[in-house]
Amino acid sequence: MSKQIDWSNLGFGYIQTEQRYVSNYKDGAWDEGTLTSDATVTISECAGVLQYAQTCFEGLKAYTTEDGHVVCFRPDLNAQRMSDSCKRLEMPVFPEDRFVEAVVKTVEANIDYVPPYGSGATLYIRPYMFGSNPVIGVKPADEYQFRIFVTPVGPYFKGGAKPITIRVSDFDRAAPHGTGHIKAGLNYAMSLHAIVDAHEQGYSENMYLDPATRTKVEETGGANFIFITKDGKFVTPKSDSILPSITRRSLMVVAEKYLGLEVEHREVAFAELENFAECGLCGTAAVISPVGKIVDHGKEICFPSGMEEMGPVTKKLYDTLTGIQMGRIEAPEGWIKTIR
């Protein structure tokens, strides 16, 4: 029985649900894992995560499709990305098959919190891991906890996806050869001052340039860029310090296989921006957020298709990907994991 929640007025925030998944790593092995109703985490004051930020996380969604199934989208890629994050942070990998099983179990245990089809809301799924035992010398922890909680969330943008204005940031999101390509909590801590400052200046987001030369487009604090050229090509930046967005990788397939667009995944020079017709940010939460304007220290770069509303090609990409996710359009094999 679905919960009595005003689904259409949900914001993007945390609502505690009934069950969450927990597994502990000790003496070189993961335990079998369990569901628990306890939403609190109890760790040592000297836990590795508190002293040296040894933590990583993922984000994905479950939702109700048009035909009434509860599904999630490409959880195997979240498992793989978390595995990459763990290796880079010297954390034990939670097995990828168990990761997907744990996602399914947690959603099943909170099935009444999955919003109904057509509400615009989804069940956000947050897997995460952290060093849990005391660590005072700078070294990896010996014990870890892997957890998953879920929370129903409303659409990321209330009142539709209106084009946003972003600025070129003077801060760097990541270091050359650093951790920009993994989903470590520390990357997001680094971006907090920059996003608060951007908001105070009236911008929705920051555009980060490559940290080595500051001449190439990278990403924002939480999303990858996509661009549409004036002759209809789909272009997305390539870099070793960009987080490999699952939405972006999916949109590349949608652009090529469903919409017949030429796809270029390559370095994008900042100087090229004025040649693009459309710009968007893509990620799990919003799917695609259209960008109308980028401000570079007073100089405005406006995208001709997308100042007032989402540009036409971006809109097709958005409609096709959400159509695949919601079961209105046939998905490529393996993209949809049916939970119920």
Image (cartoon, helix red, strand yellow):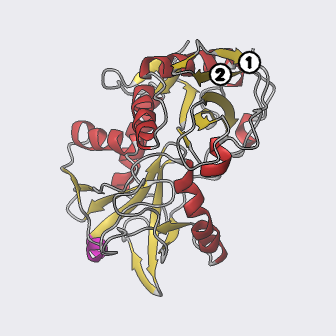
Q: Quadrant of residue 26?
A: top right
SS at mark 2? strand
Question: Is 306 within the magenta?
Answer: no
Distance from disc 2 to disc 1, alpha carbons, whole Å, reads 6 Å
* Nearer-the-camera pick, 5 or 177: 177
Q: Dot 1 corresponds to which residue?
A: 36
The furthest residue to the front: 137
Residue 45: percent from left, percent from top: 76, 43
Q: Amino acid at mark 2?
A: Tyr
Q: Quadrant of residue 236?
A: bottom left
Residue positioned 44% across, 40% down in the render: 85
| Placement of 16 over or under 218, stated as above or below | above
Q: Is residue 297 left or right of residue 279?
A: right
User: Contact, CB < 8 Å: mark 2 with mark 1?
Assistant: yes
Q: Quadrant of the C terminus?
A: top right
Residue positioned 46% across, 39% down in the render: 90
| Placement of 128 over or under 166, stated as above or below | above
Q: Amino acid at mark 1?
A: Thr
Residue positioned 41% across, 58% down in the render: 280
Residue positioned 35% across, 68% down in the render: 210
The furthest residue to the bottom: 298
Question: Is 271 within the magenta?
Answer: yes
Q: Dot 2 corresponds to which residue?
A: 21
Q: Is residue 186 visible?
A: yes
> Which of the two discs, 2 and 1, labels the residue nearer the N terminus?
2
Residue 165: percent from left, percent from top: 51, 70
Q: Quadrant of residue 231?
A: bottom left
* Nearer-the-camera pick, 189 or 303: 189
Which region of the structure is painted magenta? 270-275
Magenta span dominant secondary structure: helix
SS at mark 1? strand
* Nearer-the-camera pick, 315 or 164: 164
